Image (tube, coloured by chain):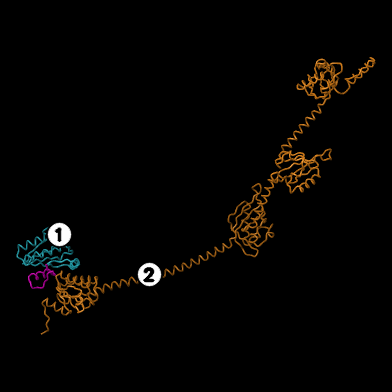
Amino acid sequence: MKSSVGPTDSLESILQELREYRAIFEVSGSSIVIIDEDTTINRANAEFFDLLGYASDEIVGKQRVPELCVLEDRDRLYDYHRLRRRAPDTAPRNYEVRFVHKNGSFVDAYVTAGIIPDTGETVLALVDISERKKAEQKSREANAYLENLLKYANGPIIVWDPNYKITRVNRAFERLTGLKSDEVLGLSLDLIFPKDKRDESMVLVRRAASKARWEALELDVAHVDGTVRTVLWSASAILADGITRIVTIAQGQDITDRKIAEEAFRETNAYLENLFNYANAPIIVWDPDYKIVRFNQAFERLTGYTSNEVLGKSLEILFPRENKRDSMDLIHRTASGERWEAVEIAIAHVDGSIRTVLWNSAAICGVSGTNIVATIAQGQDITERKKAEEALQKSHEELEARVQERTAELQTLNQALRVEIEERKRAEEIISRQAQEILEVSTPVIQIWQGIVSVPLIGTLDSGRTQQLMEQLLQKIVETSSFIALIDVTGVPTIDSKTARYLIETIKAVHLLGAEVVLTGIRPEIARTLVQLGIDLSNVNTRSSFSAGLLFAFNLLQLQVLPRA
Amino acid sequence: MKEENISVIKIQNVLLVTMPPDPDDISINLLQEKVLKNMENYRVKGLIMDISAVHILDSFFARVVAETAQMVVLMGGKTVIAGMQPSVAITATQLGLTLGGALTALNVDLAMEMINDPNQWGRRL
């Protein structure tokens, strides 16, 4: 506190002034404390005691001011105090200090310090700034909180001023666009949009900006690598004094993936739709009330109805009258979740014809998975196949009949053949018997006189006949005890070497029995042949004619044929 | 076969031998020996060999018969083989067997005549 004291002032005026200052000191409204050189409190006003909660006699003359401060402020205060003494101009006049209230709470104070001239005392005026400090602290905390919220929010956030210059972006935004925060600050908002959509997008932003806030505006955002992300934006203007727009804050949601999924879903849907519509097999869908809800083109072809004609109608119209009930029974069973596999149901065409269709069905369940929302059935028109099968069956039967017919014919033929074979066999037996007979007959051995047998040979001699001849001749010789055998070859057309050998064998055999052979009927041509062949018949009696042979035999037997006397 | 089974009988001036149905080689040799011995002991004109019982004639038998016939001829007699079966005759001719100097006769009767009457027809085979 400064005062100018002139030598002319009277004591009274000085006292008056002192009283005035004391009053000021007491009622100034701010806390004032006067401290000694060693910082001990010398005097303080009521405000000061109220501020820190101490009574006057507790601290005046006893306590140093820095000791009332928080520990970390004490050294600073001592420093200021010392500095003020040595170089008053460099010491801060105003500073903030945190005091400790007697009850332990902190009291922030704005301190104004000054030296009382010509004394070692310092006067400190304190203004309580605790509330302000607290508010500041809170504000700072809120700010930091918001800052973090902004910074680390998952959704991209962008803030721009009324001139559409970007003032803030967050990390998610950086990720979204690939731009660094400091690259975009102060630049125009339109750079975040794809080049070809900038104007259009800015128009949208401006239009939306006329309202205080807008929601769910879909705008494409360009990434620096060229890709485009679709983002759903919500924005809100921050207004100063409720009218003037300071900044606009916009928060986005990247829905690109959702868009892609939606697109894919739409494609799948379209694909399924096409599949359904253009499938070759008739497909029908009905709801739990058996009303037709879908009907594809193949079904239109099958029934002759167009899709529009039947949608919403009962399924019954599809079936021919006569088996409508059975068909509907079958269909009612699907309501309980039954599936069909290859169930045959007839379908009526509008022109009255009936098609046989093989059906497969499946229930389509709702989200809960249990309630049936619709049933889908897919058919296969087997009318043609049925017809073909029937035709096949018929032709098969015909074939069968024909085969049987032919079999019967063949059996008859077989029978005839067997009869024929039988007859042939019999004929063959007859022939062979006859051949045997002929063979026997061809060599008849006759006893023509006591002691004489004869055999006339007719036809060609072969080994079989020779054997036959030999056996019969020898047998007859033994049976009749004949000495002479007459073999007549008049009936033999030619004699070759083979025939001659057979004859010689026969003759030798007869000799072995002890009988004689006379070969008769040697005609000139046979005689010639025998000689030319060089066949030796020297020890065989030979005669030209049978009668000559007979005569020779009689001579041998010493018989004589005489005319009756 | 035993020796006794083959009998060589002298009837008047003839030796008669009856062959068993199936003679073996030993008896055939015995037969030859016996015949030659009897030819020496008795004065006979010849030998009659009755083979009417024989149904199989083998080459050994045929050879012995032929040799015996020749031996008898050398000793001044005749051999007549009598009663050959037709089947044996057929086999013999087909095999080409010969009986040497033996004569053949239909039966023993004729064989006897043949031996006693040298002018009677007869033939050496």
Asked whether, in this view, residue A398 is left or right of residue B109, the answer is right
Q: For this view, does A78 lie left or right of residue A443?
A: right
Image: A4 above or below B24: above
Compared to residue A353, the image places residue A225 above or below, namely: above
Q: Around disc 1, counting alpha carbons within 10 Å, would you say few (fewer than 14), some (14 to 19), or many (20 or more)?
A: few
Q: Within the image, what quadrant is residue A26 found in?
A: top right
Q: Which residues are magenta?
A: B101-125
**Residue A238: image location, x then y, percent:** 80, 39
Question: Residue A343: x, y in percent?
Answer: 59, 57
Per the image, label 2 sits on a secondary structure element best described as: helix
Residue, x 78% and y 31% (percent of image)? A138
Q: Which mark is residue A369?
A: none
Q: Is residue A131 above or below residue A409?
A: above
Residue pointed to by mark 2: A418
Cα separation, mark 2 vs mark 1, equals 58 Å
**What percent of the width, then of the height, locates residue B119?**
8, 73
Q: Give the orange chain's letter.
A: A
Residue A514 can be seen in this image: yes
Disc 2 marks a residue whose amino acid type is: Arg
Can residue A475 be seen here? The reply is no
Residue at image coords 64%, 48%: A370
User: Magenta segment: does it hold B123?
Assistant: yes
Within 10 Å of disc 2 (Cα), the crowding (few <14, some 14-19, many 20+) is few
Does A100 appear above or below B94? Answer: above
Nearer the observer, A216 or A439: A216
Chain B shade: cyan
Q: Which residue is denoted by mark 1 in the rendering?
A: B25
> Residue B63: x, y in percent?
14, 63
Q: Considering the image in quadrants, where does the C terminus of chain A appear?
A: bottom left
The chain carrying label 1 is: B
Q: Amino acid at mark 1?
A: Asp
Mark 2, mark 1: which one is toward the viewer?
A: 1
